[in-house]
Image (spheres, helix red, strand yellow):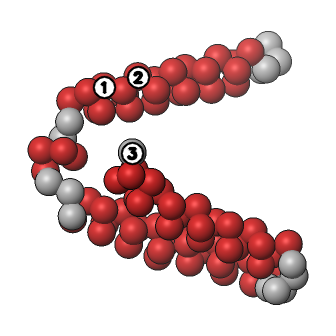
Amino acid sequence: MQQIFLVIFPFFVLVLCGYMAARLRVLQLDAIPGLNGFVLYFALPCMLYRFGANTPIGTLLDGGLFLTYLCCALVLVSLTIAITCRDRVG
């Protein structure tokens, strides 16, 4: 549990800092897209790379984790397709 917390915590702290900066008007509204771009294209990939580089390959290729991820992804895609097709005029 602590390992998961140590991986997820920096990401949510970064999101919280961005939220508080916008809420307290520390940043101008024009700066928010730049901050979003920094987080999405620089900070998050660096954090994920560091996590993946420090994790043994056997842990990354866990079959149970892969099947869980695959099932969740299929459920979400199926729900999205069902909702999208239901709302079409036809």
Q: Quadrant of residue 31?
A: bottom right
Earlier-in-chain disc, 2 versus 3: 3
Q: Quadrant of residue 45?
A: bottom left
Q: Secondary structure at mark 2?
A: helix
Q: Residues within 10 Å of mark 1 (few under 14, many from 20)?
A: few
Q: For the point 80% across and 85% down, which residue is it?
A: 27
Does residue 31 sit above or below 15 in this rendering?
below
Contact (Cβ within 8 Å) of mark 2 with mark 1: yes
Q: Amino acid at mark 2?
A: Cys
Separation of disc 2 and disc 3 at Cα? 22 Å
Q: Is residue 67 left or right of residue 6?
A: left
Question: What's the mark number on residue 67?
Answer: 1
Q: Amino acid at mark 1?
A: Leu
Q: Nearer the viewer, mark 3 or mark 1?
A: 3
Does residue 5 sit above or below 36 in this rendering?
above
Q: Residues within 10 Å of mark 2 (few under 14, many from 20)?
A: few
Separation of disc 2 and disc 1 at Cα? 6 Å
Residue 52 in percent (x, y) is at 26, 59
Q: Secondary structure at mark 1?
A: helix
Question: Which quadrant of the rendered structure holds the C terminus?
Answer: top right
Does residue 60 sit above or below 21 in this rendering?
above
Question: What's the mark number on residue 1?
Answer: 3
Residue wearing tag 2: 71
Q: Nearer the viewer, mark 2 or mark 3?
A: 3
